Amino acid sequence: MAERAPRVVAELGRPETPEETAARKAENSLKHRQRQTTKNLVLALGASLALVVVIVLLVPRSDTPLERDVDVAQVAEQAKIASDDPIAVPELPEGWRANAAELRTSQTDGVTAWYIGYLTPSDEYLGVYQGFDANPTWVSELLARTLATGTTTIAGVEWTVYDNRKTGDDVGNARYALTTESGGSTFVLLGTASPDEFTALATAIAPTVDAQD
């Protein structure tokens, strides 16, 4: 049988040399592997997206809002064991939401305090601390070691003012604060709320401040 003549390659206008044939086959093999790799990546991505969809569908959801509405008065009844002094349970108008109420003990000096965390009508934070037999160090740590800027009298109670709203220092939540002492309790109001909202809360707890022994 006669030997078949080498195939003429149109681009070359002549038969391929053995070296050119080997190079062409190697290039075709490389392109095939690249197409397979791309295909595999697309399939893997599709499988991952499908898995994410399944997980999202299977994870249970709750209609409970993230902003809790704590019954401060109910928690305060349990917290009364910490002190014989009256515990602050402010009566505030609609729009104020308590998302925390608990006893907290400082890890630094062991001071126990009654704490209430509020979201104000303007959606700002305002915290109430009533420290029992507290000391200046406890107050200083709550207020990020900032200095007093003045005093004010609200509903007959004199408060020390810490106005840090214009400082560039990192003062955490102590952008504005009020402190006062009465009986065995030290009261600290601190947060990012407006002075008017601080005044509203200070007015609400004035009867408790006055009632201290």
Image (cartoon, rainbow, N blue to C red):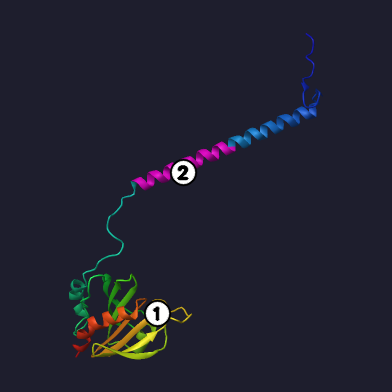
115 or 111, nearer to the observer: 115
The amino acid type found where label 2 is placed reads: Ser
Residue nearest the observer in this picture, 171 or 96 = 96
Q: Is residue 146 left or right of residue 158?
A: right
Dot placed on the residue nearer the N-terminal end, 2 or 1 = 2
Q: Which mark is residue 1?
A: none
Q: Residue at x 33, y 85 (%)?
A: 178
> Is residue 151 a member of the stretch shown in magenta?
no
In percent of width and height, residue 166 lies at 45, 81
Name the spot of residue 180 as percent of width and height, x first: 29, 88
Q: Give the residue number, with chain letter if any, for mark 2.
A: 48
For disc 1, the marked residue is: 175
The residue depicted at 41 percent of the width and 76 percent of the height is 172
| Whole-percent x, y for residue 22 in the image | 75, 29
Q: Main secondary structure of the magenta part?
A: helix
**Residue occupying the point 20% across, 89% down:** 210
Residue at position x 80%, y 16% in the image: 5
Q: Where in the figure is residue 122, as x and y percent of width and height?
A: 32, 71
Which residue is outermost to the top? 1
The magenta span reads: 37-57
Task: Check disc 1 and give the amino acid type.
Answer: Arg
